[in-house]
Image (cartoon, grey):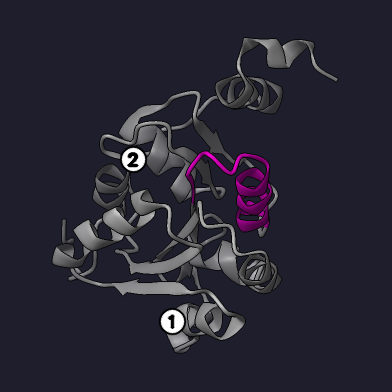
């Protein structure tokens, strides 16, 4: 699971987190997280974002509050999370136990030219989440720590905020469907059932 850089392979990390996922609902931030969950296996319970940078955590919060019986996982990047830091405070106050956020931190804006993000210079997203009031936080840097992260995600005893330090190398694109209306309808049916299409 380690890349040549000594950091985690982000796609293998996703594969570990989503193995035997059951009914886990997954929101993926734009770019690499969306490609990664699709590479692991596209399915109706995936909601990959093609845009809305900075919004993945708040979409996950809304979903977790609306569906308290379902576990919700947000997989996003460090650049995307840095754009939505206010979400940490709101999530920590609302404290949905069924919500987990995992940040794949490669210390770069991968979709806009690999500019370095603030985490490259020591900005501590885990420390920010802890200060906001998250009851469970994790920093994952080694393969042997991934099983504990997976267990925490699937335990549903959150909210959980975790940062996984991943390799910055580009990987082959595995793109989810591009049509937003289709993704929304597919996900809505997975959550609410076929009758959802007849609801206002």
Residue annotated with mark 1? 120
**Residue 104 point in image, percent of width and height:** 40, 61
- Please tell me how crowded label 1 is: few (under 14), some (14-19), or many (20+) other residues with Cα within 10 Å: few
- Closest to the observer: 97 or 176? 97
Q: Residue at x 43, y 72 (%)?
A: 136
Q: Which numbered mark, 2 or 1, is in the foreground of this view?
A: 1
Query: Which label's residue is closer to the chain start, 2 or 1?
Result: 1
Q: How many marks?
A: 2
Task: Determine the secondary structure under disc 1.
Answer: helix
Per the image, is 61 magenta? yes
Mark drawn on residue 59: none
Identify whether 181 is placed above or below 3.
above
Crowding at mark 2 (Cα within 10 Å: few <14, some 14-19, many 20+) = few
Which quadrant holds residue 188? Answer: top right
Q: Position of residue 114 (x, y in %)?
A: 48, 65
Residue drawn at point x = 67 percent, y = 20 percent: 185
Q: Quadrant of residue 86?
A: bottom right
Residue lying furthest right in this view?
200
- Quadrant placement of the N terminus: bottom left
At 46% from the left edge and 67% from the top edge, which residue is drawn?
161
Which one is nearer the viewer's eye here, 192 or 143? 192
Q: Position of 19 compared to 111: left or right?
A: left
- Report the magenta residues as a range: 55-73
x and y, in percent, of residue 197 in the image: 73, 13
Asked whether residue 129 is in view, the answer is: yes
**Does residue 4 appear in this view?**
no
Query: Disc 2 versus disc 1: distance between alpha carbons?
Result: 24 Å
Residue on which the image places disc 2: 172
Left or right, 67 with reference to 143:
right
Q: Secondary structure at mark 2?
A: loop
The image shows residue 109, relative to residue 116, as above or below, that is: above
On whether residue 102 falls in the magenta region, the answer is: no
């Amino acid at each position: 699971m380690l890349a040549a850089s000594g950091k985690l392979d982000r796609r293998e990390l996703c594969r570990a987190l989503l193995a035997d996922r059951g009914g886990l609902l997954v929101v993926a931030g734009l770019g690499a997280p969306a490609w990664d969950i699709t590479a692991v296996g596209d399915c109706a319970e995936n909601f990959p974002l093609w845009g809305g940078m900075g919004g993945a955590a708040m979409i996950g919060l809304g979903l977790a509050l609306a569906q308290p019986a379902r576990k919700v996982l947000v997989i996003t990047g460090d650049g995307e999370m840095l754009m939505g830091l206010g979400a940490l405070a709101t999530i920590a106050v609302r404290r949905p136990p069924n919500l987990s956020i995992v940040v794949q931190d490669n210390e770069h804006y991968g979709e806009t030219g690999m500019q370095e993000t603030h985490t490259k210079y020591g900005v501590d997203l885990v420390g920010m989440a802890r200060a906001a009031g998250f009851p469970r936080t994790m920093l994952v840097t080694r393969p042997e720590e991934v099983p504990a992260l997976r267990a925490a995600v699937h335990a549903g005893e959150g909210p959980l905020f975790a940062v996984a330090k991943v390799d910055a190398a580009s990987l082959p694109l595995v793109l989810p469907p591009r049509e937003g209306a289709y993704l929304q309808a597919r996900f809505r049916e997975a959550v609410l059932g076929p009758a959802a299409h007849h609801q206002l």
